[in-house]
Amino acid sequence: VSRRSAKFRAETARSVATVSRNPIDADRELGLITLVEPSRRPFAGAIVQDEYDLASPWHHHDMHQFQYAIEGSMELEDGAGGHLLPRSLAGWIPAGTRHRNSLHRIRSVSVMFSPEAIADPGEGVRILRVSPLMREMLVAAARWPLGRGLDATGTAFFAAFARLSSEWITD
């Protein structure tokens, strides 16, 4: 075990211990969560959620969101009910859609798109069967964290991802 990975494990253990001593009220309403200042927001980006241990309160984003469990499963809830998302399913959450989720020490990723990236995002949460191509794109998106600028490769990647997402969410 490298010194760096040992330090990461120790920090993660402290974070998880803090969360379990100070639980989040999952019935609380947080409202809009702006992840990146809109004037500096990139076209898209990813949030890696490995080892999170939380049940989030109700909230919504000003960006579209794909949520995917790389290993394990997560729960996603909206006004229509709860959804269990194993590796074979992903959740599509259009910007402005009220939802909450539970992530308990799994490997997962959220891919966020600016509102203009998807022409017709639909309304409400959609649960999508994950094709091999979708899975690889969801995992590969982690290369470009949300909030950092996109290089030319990232711009091309997310342009293709957005176009495919438009097809996936309407099928």
Image (cartoon, rainbow, N blue to C red):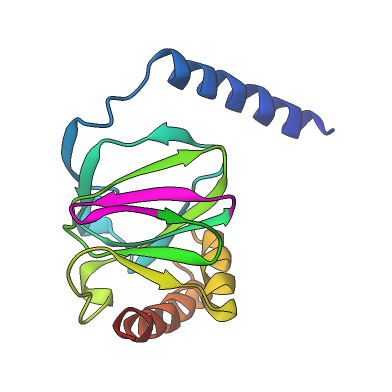
User: Residue reaching furthest right?
Assistant: 1
The x and y percentages for residue 31 are 15, 41
Task: State left or right for residue 27 relative to residue 168.
Answer: left
What's drawn in magenta, residue-wise? 71-83
The C terminus - image quarter: bottom left
Specify whether residue 86 is painted magenta.
Answer: no
Quarter residue 64 falls in: bottom left
Q: Nearer the viewer, residue 83 or 5?
A: 83
Quarter residue 56 falls in: top left
User: Residue reaching furthest top?
Assistant: 21
The N terminus - image quarter: top right
Task: State left or right for residue 158 relative to residue 114.
Answer: right
Q: What secondary structure characterizes most of the magenta part?
A: strand
Q: Nearer the viewer, residue 111 or 143?
A: 111
Specify whether residue 72 is painted magenta.
Answer: yes
Q: Residue at x 28, y 59 (%)?
A: 41
The x and y percentages for residue 33 are 22, 44
Task: State left or right for residue 67 relative to residue 93.
Answer: right
Q: Residue at x 56, y 61 (%)?
A: 87
Q: Count how many numbered circles sit on residues in the image.
A: 0
Quarter residue 28 falls in: top left
Q: Residue at x 24, y 65 (%)?
A: 94
